[in-house]
Image (tube, rainbow, N blue to C red):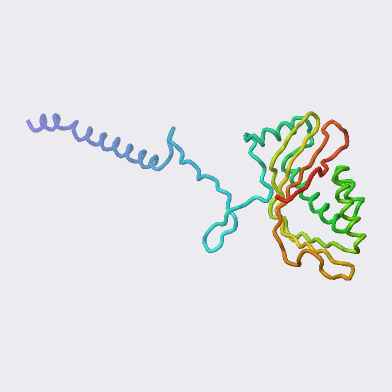
Amino acid sequence: MPSNTLQSLGPFPIILILFAGVAIFLILRLRSVLGKRVGFERQAPPPAFTPQGPVIEGQAQPVTPSRPVPDQQSPLGQRLMQIVQRTTDFDPPKFLEQAETAFRTIVTAFAGGDRSTLQSLLTPHVYETFNSAITAREQAGERHRTEIKSIISTSIENAELLGDQAAIIVRFVSDQVNLTLDSNGNPADGTEAVVELTDLWTFERNLKAPGTGWLLAAARSG
């Protein structure tokens, strides 16, 4: 009787041992997998990129581009794209850089009476206007002194394409010193103080004429 009882109970300890082994195996596998990405888990989106300037007193200062370019999808941007499609060497950011260089050169040349430089950068009509002002200044014995302290911004205000003739209006905001001296060297007009000025210059170019660049066709204060 005892031997029969042991025989009937004998299989149970073995089964329990097997279940215990399987359980331990599963626990170890789960521990090795927990904390890992397995399959189509949604990745956390990266933080949005926000341009930032230098950090001052714990706060990032906003970045203000000095030569902002119009959005390509805007009406102005689409008009610029018409010019881009007509000539391979027109690039709005590069144009703004060249326009800023022309602005500095023309302002300096006018103050110094440099007719040769002005003639190469102005349309004939505008050159005659500048030349008349220089002549009148010379006849009065006056000298003009202009110093561009800084150009705050250079931006495209408008653009037009009429046939082969392209025109772009550029707004320049700059800090300048403008002073006219009389024949005795005394201040006749202007001031030594730095003044912020806004100028609207229109540059024109014949897209079909080979070797032609952008020329100043009009200038006014804005």
Q: Position of residue 70 (x, y in %)?
A: 65, 40
Q: Residue at (55%, 46%) from the top-left corner?
A: 49
Q: Position of residue 32 (x, y in %)?
A: 39, 41
Q: Where 22 falls versus 57 (above or below)?
A: above
How many numbered circles are shown? Answer: 0
Q: Nearer the viewer, residue 31 or 35?
A: 35
Q: Position of residue 86 (x, y in %)?
A: 77, 30
In this image, 110 relative to 220: left or right? right
In this image, 163 relative to 222: left or right? right
In this image, 25 relative to 113: left or right? left
The quadrant in which the N terminus is found is: top left
Q: For the view shown, which residue lies furthest in the left direction?
A: 1
Corner quadrant of residue 205: top right
Q: Residue at (69%, 43%) from the top-left corner?
A: 157
Corner quadrant of residue 138: bottom right
Q: Nearer the viewer, residue 57 or 213?
A: 213
Q: Nearer the viewer, residue 13 or 146?
A: 146
